[in-house]
Image (cartoon, grey):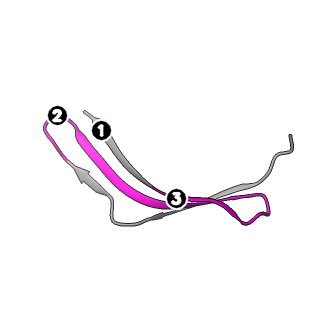
Amino acid sequence: MQMQNTTFIVQSLHPDQLFVEEGADVYEGVGQVWAFFGNSNTVSTGKAWIEQNLGK
């Protein structure tokens, strides 16, 4: 299998959010991603949401 260069471009769609809570802080964010493999055209795109418990 031959290795290829891979490029990911991620764009935030709105400001990230950090909710500070008594038990644990929570981070939320949403973004758009474009993935390019080798010299080909865009092969994958999509939106993603993250919600992460940051613990304490």
Amino acid found under the numbered disc labelled 3: Gly
Quarter of the rendering occupied by the C terminus: top left
Which residues lie in the magenta part? 20-47
Q: Main secondary structure of the magenta part?
A: strand
Query: Which quarter of the figure has residue 7?
Result: bottom right
Q: Residue at x 16, y 34 (%)?
A: 23
Q: Which residue is mark 2?
A: 23
Label at residue 14: none
Query: Which quarter of the figure has residue 24?
Result: top left
Decide if residue 55 is on the left or right side of residue 3: left
Amino acid found under the numbered disc labelled 2: Gly
Q: Which residue is mark 3?
A: 46
Query: Which quarter of the figure has residue 43?
Result: bottom right
- Give the x, y percent position of residue 11: 48, 65
Amino acid found under the numbered disc labelled 1: Asn
- Give the x, y percent position of residue 20: 19, 46
Question: Do callouts 1 and 2 mark residues in contact (Cβ within 8 Å)?
Answer: no
Q: Which residue is mark 1?
A: 53
What's the distance in space between the residues labelled 1 and 2, CA to CA? 10 Å
Secondary structure at badge 2 equals loop
Of pointers 1 and 2, the one earlier in the residue sequence: 2
Decide if residue 13 is on the left or right side of residue 3: left
Q: Residue at x 86, y 40 (%)?
A: 1
Secondary structure at badge 3 equals strand
Of pointers 2 and 3, the one earlier in the residue sequence: 2
Judge whether residue 45 is colored magenta: yes
Judge whether residue 41 is colored magenta: yes
